[in-house]
Amino acid sequence: AKMVVFNLLVLGEAASGRTTLARALAAACGGTLPPPGPEPLRCRMADSGSVFEVLVWDTSAQDRLTSMTDGALRTAHAFVITISAAAPPTHERLLRWAQLLHAAFLRTKSSSASLEHLPVVLAVTHTDVATAPADLCAMAAASVATEYGMNMVWRPVSSPTTAGIADIISYVAPRMTAYVAAVDQSTSYHSRQPDGGATVLMRGWMVKRGDIIKNWKRRYFRVYATGKMDYSVNESTRKPRGAFLLPGCRFIDKASCGPIDWPAMPALSGLTESDKYCFGLQPSDGHRVFYIVCFDEFDLQANRFHLQKWLGVFTLHGISL
């Protein structure tokens, strides 16, 4: 039988030990180590008695991730992000990696597999010369789960001995196979019409403010022919986080929303303040206003069209704009 092949991408900032770690991962799994170059390192990993081939890709610095559309990223099964403890990592730097990965994943993936199953490891390198900021890394992992629906763990790696490589392998190996199963299940799920068979008129990403904790989170919204609008953490989640009916909703433009601390656009989105489309939707029960920022992070040239499509769907359901 043909051996299953998985792609493991190693990303990292300059001087973060990315290449050293990628080669250490391959060497620990019996891989050969040709001179550094664009070709992947081949090795084998095992899970529950099954042996599979892994291609370890040593990518360039993080700016390439914003434009990477090659086959390795399109079919990636796991990511290891290297960041050096010697250059004290900040919460913003860690979240920037998550944002980059999230955007690249959604832009290039042909399937809609849930990000929550994708194994992502933050490898904090050079812990032999600096202490890994455990509290900061744990907080960043929690933020990544909340904001992007990804499960990211962090592991300390001591260079040049690369102690900690075994921990990364033991985490990644079984989860790559689980991720493939999630892809298959998600693809099967999305082949059916959601919400009891109702047609989806519009779907896409917007940013919504929380009701109790007033923070802003990216959510995937859907509007159905029945008039229902729901939202979830990502596009493959079966159970939505919330829902309401559009018929009878009151549309509130930004100027009429009052003193709302609207979120700044993500630094990497390429958007400016003038690109923000901010509004409120208040369902007919009148108990809550949903404050929403509408933009298309993955097609920056189509923001106005993206907004018009949403407003068109609202009008279709009798909402006066």
Image (tube, rainbow, N blue to C red):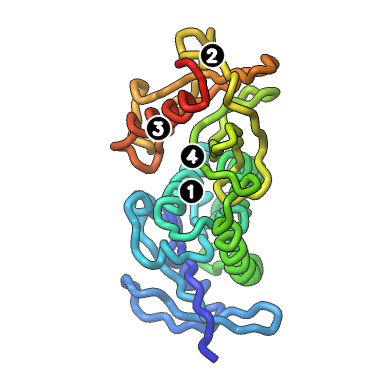
Mark in the foreground, 1 or 4: 4
Q: Residues within 10 Å of mark 2 (few under 14, many from 20)?
A: few
> CB atoms at circles 1 and 2 under 8 Å apart?
no
| Residue lying at 47% horizontally and 14% vertically, measured from the top left | 253
Report the amino acid beneath label 1. His
Residue position for label 4: 201
Report the amino acid beneath label 2. Ile
1 or 3: tag closer to the N-terminus = 1
Mark in the foreground, 4 or 3: 4
Residue position for label 1: 102
- 31 relative to 231, above or below: below
1 or 4: tag closer to the N-terminus = 1
Q: Is residue 131 visible?
A: no
Frontmost residue, 78 versus 166:
78
- 209 relative to 82, above or below: above
Residue position for label 3: 309
C-alpha distance separating marks 1 and 3: 24 Å
* Spot occupied by residue 74 in the image (x, y as percentages of width and height): 42, 62
Helix, strand or loop status at disc 2: loop
> CB atoms at circles 2 and 4 under 8 Å apart?
no
* Spot occupied by residue 91 in the image (x, y as percentages of width and height): 54, 38
Mark in the foreground, 2 or 4: 4
Report the amino acid beneath label 3. Lys
3 or 2: tag closer to the N-terminus = 2
| Residue lying at 49% horizontally and 24% vertically, measured from the top left | 263
Helix, strand or loop status at disc 1: helix
Q: Residue furthest bottom?
A: 1
Image quadrant assignment for residue 287:
top right
